[in-house]
Image: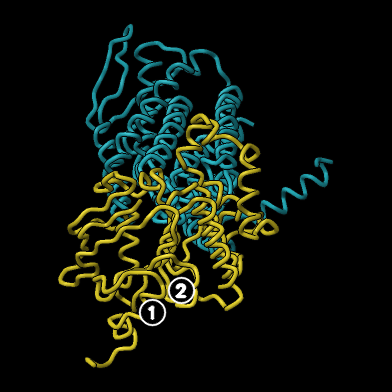
Amino acid sequence: MLELAQTSRHFGGVRAVDQLSLTVEEGRIFGLIGPNGSGKSTTVNLVTGLLPLTSGRITFRGADLGGVPVHRRLALGIARTFQNIRLFGHLTVWQNLWVAQNSPEDHARRGFLARWLGGSRRVRAEIGELLEFSGLAHRQNELASNLAFGEQRRLELARALAARPKLLCLDEPAAGMNAEEIGELAARIRAIRDRGVTVLLIEHHMELVMDVTDRIAVLNFGQKIAEGTPAEVQADRAVRTAYLGGGDK
Amino acid sequence: MDFYFGLAQIIGVHTLLGLSAYIVLLTGQVTLAQAGFFAIGAYVSAMLTVLAGWPIVAALGVGTLFGAGAACAVGFPALRVKGLMLVIATLAFGEGVRLFFFNFDYQVAKGQVKVGPVGGEGFRQIRYFPEHGWTTFDVMLFIWVFVVLIMAVLWWFDRSRYGAVLRAVGEDEIAAQSVGINLTAVKVSAMTIGGAIAGIGGGLYAHYTTHIEHSSFNILVATFAIAYPIVGGLASVFGTLAAVVFVQGFLIEGLRFLGDWRNLLFGALIVLAMNVRPRGLLDAPTLGRLGRFGRLFGGGR
């Protein structure tokens, strides 16, 4: 579904992502892990188009993403959340989901004027369902900036889903969450996969990654040092060295 | 009484000027080009009534289209830059328009006299209203029909998905792009709508003052345009109206008895207003309270 071929992104002399090749298969939860500064977030920014590639090629469902602007990539089916939550704080919870309805399906179903100038009534059911799924229905008229941290994370996830993506990139969705919230998050990620959405999960929290992913790639200094099932990756020597540091034994 | 009708005309036209900047400010862009669109609307519609003998509504319509067209044309290149760079780019445009009219001569003989804009002297004798026997009261009503209409349309935009998208772009461009919003389309559309509103405002302004010149569209006017929505608050269109009434009605006319001291107090009071009400004269909580008050006495929902 998503294919990165020899992709690189250099910032001056720093090779944030270096000759990275990955294939994310449809319907899977694909984990991308690695120590701090290993190029995980940069990879998401390359996939979603916020950063241009230095070299290489990214294809999504067979189409080359080179030169496709960020908002067009969403229309192709790539949505994301951010490591540092980026909500529209002065809009209500409900409005945050409303403005994100930009999928081709929404375009096809509603005419131009209805889509832009129509009131909120027509889309109430769809947004209500998303709010229910995210456990935010009781907060729908609250300003997004007034939500608690965990709720903000859930809202950002719901906002990405409002665009009906085929691939969802989650950039450290568990950061700052407690164990209970992480358990809920794992269930929610599986539920998203079961809706037919492929997930690219970037995460530091190993238990979560090992728990939910089907396949994992490990980055270190912008390069892929291992790939495989969670069990294979856990047993990998290079991975242990990258995380725990130390010897050449 | 004519004094108050005249004041209402000024308030009406300045409200349009402020609203033209309001919609652009919602997208987080600071524009100093509004005086330019205001000038274009003023000159185009005045030339149509004076030189071509068009009826006022048709002339205003064409002035509006010119304002919108100019804004759209400026929007594409200008909105690629951000923040201070955008301020400078739009300022350059506004001054460019002013200097164009400073040098613009187009006079036509009409009976004994020559009419039309003459460069630095300006464009005199825009006498459509007096020639057609409109009283100050009629003109005031005419202006306010447009003000109410445009406020209603913008109020509706604010409540539609388009309004929410404008505010989303104003808040976080990266997040807005990432949820599929085309930033260029949204910003240029807001700029174009703003240009259209400034164009109407300019046309009305030219006809009620009967005399325009390049200095009527200087940087001070551009500053007022963005000051109204900012002082009034971006929570709704009523903030802009409140700020115009505060500035034009209270600070400029109300304090006239103070003589030269007025200008000093003018600045101080604006600073005070922004300190006491940092989110604008009519911020969201105030509007909420007013809304409940309205329902209480209106019997509403």
> Which of the 4 image quarters holds residue B297?
top right
Left or right of A190? Residue B43 is left
Which quarter of the rendering shows the C terminus of chain B? top right
For chain B, the rendered hue is: cyan
- Dot 1 or dot 2, earlier in sequence: 2
**x then y, percent, for residue A98:** 56, 46
Q: Which of these two is toward me, B74 or B240? A: B74
- Residue lying farthest to the left in this orientation: A13
Which quarter of the rendering shows the N terminus of chain B? top right
Label ID, residue B297: none
Left or right of A41? Residue A177 is right
Location of residue B266 with respect to A11 vertically, above or below: above
- Asked if marks 1 and 2 fall on the same chain, the answer is yes
Q: Which of these two is toward me, B84 or A247? A: A247
Location of residue B124 with respect to B81 vertically, above or below: above
For chain A, the rendered hue is: yellow
Give the Cα separation between the discs numbered 1 and 2: 9 Å
Residue placed under numbered mark 1 in the picture: A234
Q: What amino acid is labelled 2 in the image?
A: Met
- Residue at 46% from the left image edge and 77% from the top image edge: A205
Asked whether the residues under the numbered discs 1 and 2 touch, taking CB atoms below 8 Å apart as contact, a structural biologist would say: yes
How many neighbours does mark 2 have within 10 angstroms: few (below 14), some (14-19), or many (20 or more)? some
